[in-house]
C-alpha cells in the first residue's frame, strides 16, 4: 500500500464576501486570520487508487466537484468516481455559489478554485510512498451542543471552562475518529472525523479562517512539520459549537479556545492510534435526487405574494427585510423554473470509500445525529463514518421530530439551496447510504 498527502492554499483575496449566518449581509472579509487549504490524501493498493480532498469551504457545488475530478483524472488516471471532494463547512470562508443570497461569489476566485483543489489531489498522487494506517477513537466532549434539543449558553463563561459539557451529550458526537498515516515512523498525515457546525464566529465577524477545525489542523501541522491534516465533517445538521453567534471580540477569543480543545483531541488520537490492516480499498458513487414536497405553482405564487406584502410594511426592520427579500428572490426563481417546465429537485450524488475496515459514506446533505446513529447501527463494517458536505451542498437531512416541528433546517434551508423542502430526506438518505455500504462490502 502507498499513501500520499499534499495541500494547496485556497485562501481568497481580502474583500470577498463570506458565506453563512444570514442572507444579503454583505459580510465582506477584511483580513486573513488563518489561511484556507485544500488538503488531499491519495491511497493506492493493488493497482486501485482513491483520493480524498478536504477543503476549508462552506461547500462545493456538484459542478465544481466534477470539474475537479476531470482535471485530476486527466493528470493522474484516478477514476472520477474514486475522487471525493469534502468541505469543512466553515462560515468564515468565501461564498462558493451554492446558496441563494448567502454571499456574492467572487468570479475571478471561483474560476481558479477548482484548479487549486485539483492541484492538491494531483500532488498527493505524486507523493505516494509505502505507508501504514493507524486509527484511534478519542473522547471529544465539550465542543458541540445539539441546537434542536438544547438551548445554547447565554454567555461564554461556562463553555470556556474545560469541564463544560452539554446537558444532553448523547445528542452530539462525544468521540472523534483520528486516522493517521506513517512511513518509517514519521507522520505523513492524518484525517479526523467529527460532527459539529463550524460556527464559533458570528454575523459580525469579517476575518477569513477555517473555524475551529481548520485552525486546529493548522496547529497540529505546525507541531508535526511536513504532515497534512484532513477534516471530514460528520453529522452536524443539528449540532453547533458550544459558543456561537457572540460578538466579534468574544468570537475570536472563543475560536482559539475551541480550536485548542479540538487540537488536543487530534494530538491524543495521533499518539494513541493503533495500526490497522488494510486488505483492500473500494469506492462507489451513485446519482440520487431527493424527493421534495408536492408544492405546486399556486402555492409558490401565494407565498411570493405574502412575502411581497411583508416587504411593503412601513415598520419593517433591516434584518427582517433581508430575510423576506431572500424568500422573494428564491420564490421568484422557483416560479420561473416551474413555468419553464424545469424540475426543482436537484440531482446530486452519494459516495462511499472504503479503506480496509474504515468506510466513509458521504452526501451533500447536512445529516442529523439521529440519522448518523441509525446508519452506523446497521452498517456492515466495524467503523463507519457518515460524512456531510461531500461533493455538493444541498441543505439538511433532519430527523422526524425536527421535520415535524419545521423551522430553519427543515423549511428555510431548502430555499437557500434553490428548492422547496424535502419530503422524506432522512429515510431516503439512510436507505441510500446503507445500500452503498452493502456495495462496498
Image (spheres, rainbow, N blue to C red):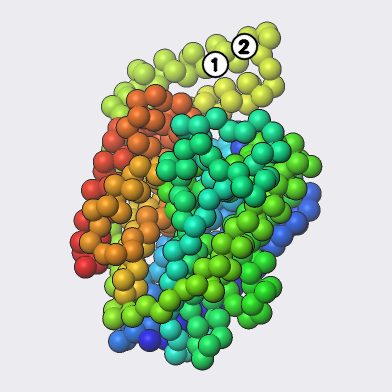
Q: Is 3 rendered above or below residue 425? A: below
Circle 2 is placed at which residue position?
Answer: 312
Circles 2, 1 touching at the beta carbon (< 8 Å) = yes
Q: Position of residue 289 (x, y in %)?
A: 30, 45
Residue picked out by circle 1: 308
In this view, the residue in front, 16 or 107, is 16
The single residue placed furthest to the top in the displayed view is 314
Residue at figure coordinates x 57%, y 22% from the top left:
324
**Residue 62 position within the rendered picture, expressed as x and y whole percent measured from the top left:** 43, 55
Q: Give how far across and how far down residue 233 sits, in percent.
A: 48, 55
What residue do we see at 31% from left, 29% from top?
293
The structure residue drawn at horizontal position 75% and vertical position 48%, both measured from the top left corner, is 253
Q: Secondary structure at mark 1?
A: helix
In the rendered view, tell whether residue 141 sits above or below residue 99.
below
| In this view, 439 is above or below 402 | below
Residue 177 image-quadrant placement: bottom left
Amino acid at each position: 500500500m502507498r499513501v500520499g498527502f499534499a495541500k494547496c492554499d485556497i485562501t481568497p483575496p481580502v474583500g470577498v464576501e463570506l458565506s453563512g449566518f444570514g442572507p444579503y449581509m454583505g459580510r465582506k472579509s477584511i483580513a486573513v486570520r488563518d489561511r484556507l487549504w485544500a488538503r488531499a490524501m491519495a491511497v493506492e493498493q493493488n493497482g486501485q487508487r482513491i483520493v480524498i480532498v478536504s477543503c476549508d469551504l462552506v461547500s462545493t457545488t456538484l459542478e465544481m466537484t466534477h470539474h475537479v475530478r476531470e482535471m485530476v483524472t486527466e493528470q493522474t488516471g484516478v477514476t472520477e468516481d474514486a475522487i471525493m471532494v469534502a468541505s469543512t463547512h466553515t462560515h468564515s470562508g468565501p461564498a462558493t455559489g451554492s446558496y441563494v443570497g448567502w454571499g456574492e461569489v467572487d468570479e475571478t476566485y471561483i474560476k481558479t478554485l477548482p484548479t487549486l483543489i485539483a492541484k492538491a489531489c494531483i500532488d498527493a498522487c505524486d507523493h505516494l510512498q509505502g505507508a501504514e494506517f493507524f486509527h484511534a477513537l478519542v473522547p471529544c466532549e465539550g465542543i458541540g451542543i445539539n441546537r434542536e434539543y438544547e438551548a445554547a449558553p447565554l454567555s461564554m463563561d461556562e463553555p470556556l471552562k474545560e469541564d463544560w459539557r452539554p446537558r444532553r451529550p448523547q445528542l452530539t458526537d462525544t468521540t472523534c475518529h483520528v486516522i493517521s498515516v506513517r512511513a518509517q515512523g514519521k507522520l505523513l498525515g492524518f484525517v479526523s472525523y467529527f460532527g459539529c457546525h463550524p460556527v464559533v464566529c458570528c454575523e459580525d465577524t469579517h476575518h477569513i479562517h477555517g473555524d475551529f477545525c481548520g485552525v486546529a489542523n493548522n496547529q497540529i501541522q505546525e507541531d508535526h512539520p511536513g504532515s497534512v491534516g484532513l477534516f471530514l465533517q460528520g453529522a452536524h445538521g443539528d449540532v453547533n459549537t458550544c459558543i456561537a453567534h457572540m460578538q466579534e471580540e468574544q468570537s475570536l477569543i472563543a475560536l482559539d479556545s475551541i480550536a485548542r480543545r479540538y487540537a488536543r483531541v487530534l494530538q491524543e488520537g495521533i499518539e494513541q492510534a493503533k495500526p490497522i490492516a488494510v486488505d483492500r480499498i473500494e469506492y462507489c458513487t451513485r446519482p440520487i435526487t431527493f424527493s421534495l414536497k408536492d408544492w405546486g405553482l399556486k402555492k409558490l405564487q401565494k407565498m411570493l405574494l405574502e412575502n411581497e406584502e411583508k416587504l411593503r410594511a412601513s415598520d419593517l426592520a433591516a434584518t427582517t427585510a433581508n430575510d423576506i427579500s431572500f424568500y422573494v428572490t428564491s420564490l421568484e426563481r422557483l416560479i420561473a423554473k416551474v413555468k419553464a417546465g424545469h424540475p426543482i429537485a436537484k440531482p446530486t450524488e452519494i459516495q462511499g470509500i472504503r479503506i480496509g475496515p474504515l468506510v466513509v459514506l458521504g452526501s451533500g446533505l447536512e445529516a442529523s445525529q439521529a440519522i448518523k446513529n441509525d446508519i452506523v447501527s446497521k452498517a456492515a463494517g466495524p467503523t463507519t463514518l457518515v460524512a456531510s458536505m461531500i461533493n455538493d451542498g444541498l441543505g439538511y437531512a433532519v430527523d422526524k421530530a425536527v421535520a415535524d416541528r419545521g423551522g430553519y433546517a427543515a423549511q428555510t434551508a431548502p430555499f437557500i439551496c434553490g428548492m422547496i423542502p424535502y419530503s422524506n430526506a432522512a429515510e431516503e438518505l439512510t436507505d441510500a447510504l446503507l445500500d452503498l455500504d452493502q456495495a462496498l462490502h
